[in-house]
Structure formats: structure tokens, C-alpha cells
Image (tube, rainbow, N blue to C red):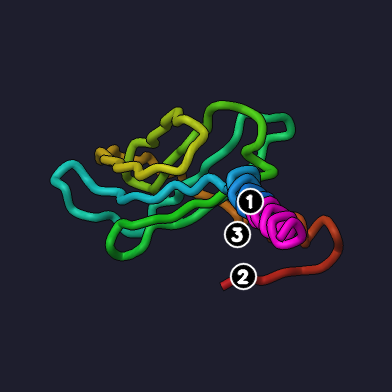
Amino acid sequence: MTNIKYASHFLTSVLLFFTITFFVKDNCYAQTTLTGTVRNAAGQPLEGILLEVETKAQPPASAFVISGADGGFKLSLPATATATGDSLRLSARALGYAAQLRRLLNRSQTVELRMREKATKLREAAARQHMQQRAKRAGNPLELR
């Protein structure tokens, strides 16, 4: 009877050990995941918005994604990148919209972003003439059409 009681106690201890190890392991190596939707001022989903999340740790770790047709996005940082630091920086950018910058807690969460339109002044590029001048200086005539 003593052997059975000892074996039962041993198996209970082993089972408890593996259960605790399983849960602690998952909590120690959990990654931070940000999900959400990007919308315009009218509430319509925006596709093609560049989103970046960055840690404050040195060196900083970052992840990038472009929002889908439904405006949705999912960004994940591995556990090694989020182990230190208590906050993240989320930025959203697109041509024709004002950039968004948010400080977030370093934990998985859902984020809803509203982008407001902003006129973007574009400058003309004179690449053609510059390339022709460089080619002439190098002794290679270059004709661009």
C-alpha cells in the first residue's frame, strides 16, 4: 500500500510540474500582436496604409505591414523584441493622409485608426537631364526618349 501511495504522490507531482512548466513557458515567450482597422474620417476602410510598430528598446525592433482592402492589419513582434520596455510606437502613413503616431502599452491589443486627408505637395524630379549630364561626363552619350 505504501508503494502505491508513493507512486500516486510521485505521478501527481510530475503532472503538476509539467502543467506549471507549460503555462509559464507560454507566458514567457508570448509575442505582442497588434490588430485593427484603418479608416478615413467618414469611417470607410482604407487600403494601402503603411503601418509600423517599433519598440523603445535599444536596438529597436520593428515590424511593417500594409492594410488590406478591408482596412485591416495585423502586426506581430516576437517575444525577444518585446521582452524589455513597456511601450510601443505605432505609426501609420500614406500619400494624401496626415501621418498618425500613437504610443501604446507593450501588450497584444486591438487598435482603431482614423486617418484624415492632407494635401501632399509633390516636387518635380529632373532625373532625365541629370542622367544625360552624367553620361556625357563619363564619355558615354546617352539618349533618353
Residue at x 30% of width, y 57% of height: 71
Residue at x 66% of width, y 71% of height: 143
Q: Residue 14, image x and y in percent?
A: 71, 55
Query: Decide: marks 2, 3 in contact (CB < 8 A)?
Result: yes
Query: Mark 3 belongs to which amino acid?
Result: Arg
Label 3 and label 1: CA atoms lie apart by 72 Å
Number of the label disc, if any, that sits on residue 128: 3
Number of the label disc, if any, that sits on residue 99: none
Sooner in the amino-acid sequence: mark 1 or mark 2: 1
Look at the image and give the residue range highlighted in magenta.
1-16
Image check: 86 left or right of 123?
right
Residue at x 53% of width, y 50% of height: 125
Front-most of residues 103 and 3:
3
Query: Mark 1 belongs to which amino acid?
Result: Leu
Q: Residue 44, image x and y in percent?
A: 18, 53
Q: Residue 48, image x and y in percent?
A: 38, 58
Q: Quadrant of the C terminus?
A: bottom right
Per the image, label 3 sits on a secondary structure element best described as: helix
Name the front one of labels 3 and 1.
1
> Disc 2 designates what residue?
144
Image check: 43 left or right of 90?
left
Number of the label disc, if any, that sits on residue 16: 1
Per the image, label 2 sits on a secondary structure element best described as: loop
Query: Decide: marks 1, 2 in contact (CB < 8 A)?
Result: no
Front-most of residues 52 and 128:
52
User: Eyeballing the image, is 73 above or below 80?
Assistant: below
